[in-house]
Amino acid sequence: MEEKYFGHSVIRKEGREKVTGRARYVDDLSFPDMLHGVTVRSSVARGRIRGIHFGDGIPWNEFTIVTAADIPGKNEIALIEHDQPCLASEIINHPEEAIVLLAHPDRYLLEEARRAVQIEVEPLPAIFSIEDSLAKTAVIFGEDNVFKSYRVDKGDVDAAWAQADIIVEGEYRTGAQEQLYIENQGMIATANPADGVTVWGSLQCPYYVHKALVPLFGLPAEKIRVIQSETGGGFGGKEEYPSMIAGHAALLASKSGRPVKIIYDRAEDMVATTKRHPSRTRYRTGVTRDGKLVAMDIDFVIDGGAYATLSSVVLSRGTIHAAGPYYCPNVRVISKAVATNAPPHGAFRGFGAPQSIFALERHLDQVARSVNLTPEEFRRRNFIQKGQTTATGQLIHEDVDFNGLLDRAFRECDYHAKRERFARENPGAAIKRGIGFASFMHGAGFTGSGEVYLASVVELEATPEGTVRVLAASTEIGQGTNTVFSQIAADALGIGYDRIEIAQPDTGAVPNSGPTVASRTSMVVGNLVEAAALALKRTLLDSGLLCDACTEDEFVRACKRYIETRGPLRSRSQYEPPPGLYWNDTTYSGDAYGTYAWAVYVAEVAVDTLTFEARVTDFVAVQEIGKVIHPVLAAGQIEGGVAQAIGMALYENVVWREGRMANGQMTNYIMPTAADIPPIRVFFEEQPYPFGPHGAKGIGELPMDGPAPAILNAIENATGICVREIPATPEVLMEAMTEKAGALV
């Protein structure tokens, strides 16, 4: 198949609309007689609702007011556990939990009314830490506060300790992180008995919202319609939470009989919606004197917040990646997602893997030191290779050239020379410099049997004018879905890129191609786009209206003739797993992913010993992601992920007070700006994956995984201090460096 567009940086499909301002985001949409909606929330972490009081001075008769009693179906946000209510009715489980909804034409009066609603609450004991949740100081979920647990067993860890010459233990922690997408969360809903419920919104997964609204309203699936409006970023934060806002807007619309728009301001968005799960990881690692891994015993725990949401899938990804891209004959991973009385944590780029990979890559630097090896040499002795197995027992079939990736990364940043120079120059210097790296992998697509369960579908349809429309629920949220799908379809059909149109994701019009998550869009759904395009072309070839070596004009004429004589010209493809994959959900063993992307990232830092501020001054990212579809978009994905991970590593500290985010404003939640981001040099190695379009793999999560440990490894190289938590703010570094100085006195 000729690659006319694949591998080239074509103009973005939706770029002109965005640049000219014609793109319509949810807050740009308006409907006749539309009301505005707001949410009245809890101010306490846990308690029993004793009353709802509506204050004086507000014309309450003008308002639409919704409580849990107004929900026509089940009071739940259907996702995995179905444990989260749409509106709290008796028990409050976290600050910011939704209790009352209000709607009114006047947004300013609406805000006054929100402040005038008082929730009378009887306080109940609450939990605010992983340790208290595990200790069951209060029980807020099930019998033990555990949303989900997994166990991975390979070999015999307990017996293997006798083979280890050295055993190294360590504990590592990561904090919460806010997604900070450019566009705040928002939804518009209409509802009436004849048409059912329709919502428009800023979202990643239309069919997730659809799944949630069906039981909430007790309506048949065909009476629920979800349409994605232009979406300004998501990063996982618009995966599950839009179901909540959609439910709220739709309940108000149903009771008022009028369209209702709910748009969060930045402060509400930050304090009420999901964030990255905080984590605690404990490693016990046995090695031989010559630096070979013998056993790894890993205890991985994440803080799920008050409700389960997506904690099980976040935990799954973190569990599987906890042993990294290394061969170890004996591995045990025991993991738990536990409940606390904070707003539920949810998906965020990398979902689980950045947490466990941070711990692993920091820990392995300590293990290397224990056997008197450099971090580089220790990893070289343990990199996984073709024919070896991962922690889940997955046999690696592809040629994994981690030594080559490491060589390329070191060459591009002059690693060895800098390491020697910094060692000479740092003693006595106020600003100390260091360099560190992380080697890691990320599985592409849903874990294990997840893609089989989704059974994703894509359709293509041709018009008499020769335009081909791609119908899929996969959303464009800034990452380039529309462009990539167009490249794939155009090359498969042998027509111009401009002849491909991407249908607006709308559950009433497009099939369910699965959620826009998990580095699956280009690889999994893109493969379906290619298959459907080839099927459509085959239909024309079999009809005798088209020949193999056709021109674009001949393709257009064939489409017109086919439709005139035979009716609609459509094709459909459905996911089928690559041959030979096997996954056991009970034992959590087997082929966790069809393939992995592999990477080595190197960070250079400068640490000011007077202000205790660490800055990343240079960054090199080398990765093997199969064939690169769109070089500019691919590099942009890496650059953006690295920038977010720098924030995770050094700046973005969510301050919690009694389960509530205390710094939920852009003025005091510190994130890196352009001035804080170093040059990020991105390099790709290509090894085509046979079951991706033209050999492409997933890419979106990968760049979130490696920067934080690389940066902290570099800080240790610069200062000699071993920081085991992130974000490594100046306060954290000051405490560690002061403690070290005191120990040396």
Image (cartoon, helix red, strand yellow):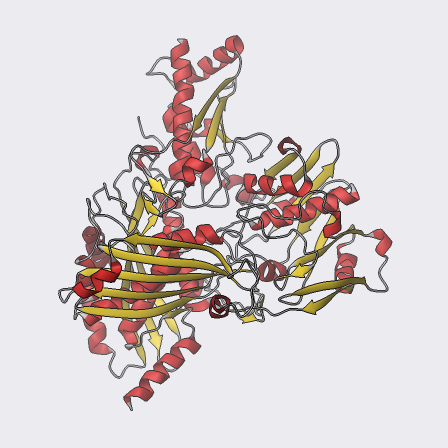
Image location (x, y in percent) of residue 44:
65, 67
**Quarter of the figure that contains the C terminus:** bottom left
**Quarter of the figure that contains the N terminus:** top left
Residue 10 visible in image: no
On screen, residue 311 above or below 494:
below
Query: For this view, does 668 lie left or right of residue 498?
Result: right
Q: What residue appears at the point 38 percent right and 77 percent down from the top-left corner?
A: 733
Image location (x, y in percent) of residue 574:
43, 29
Q: What residue appears at the point 50 percent right and 61 percent down from the top-left corner?
A: 144
Which corner quadrant of the image does residue 231 belong to? top right
User: Closest to the observer: 417 or 173?
Assistant: 173
Image location (x, y in percent) of residue 433:
29, 73
User: Closest to the observer: 480 or 75?
Assistant: 75
Q: How many marks?
A: 0
Q: What residue appears at the point 34 percent right and 64 percent down from the top-left corner?
A: 359
Q: What residue appears at the point 41 percent right and 10 percent down from the top-left corner?
A: 543
User: Closest to the observer: 279 or 92?
Assistant: 92
On screen, residue 333 above or below 655:
above
Residue 727 visible in image: yes
Which corner quadrant of the image does residue 38 belong to? bottom right
User: Closest to the observer: 337 or 472?
Assistant: 337
Which corner quadrant of the image does residue 411 belong to? bottom left
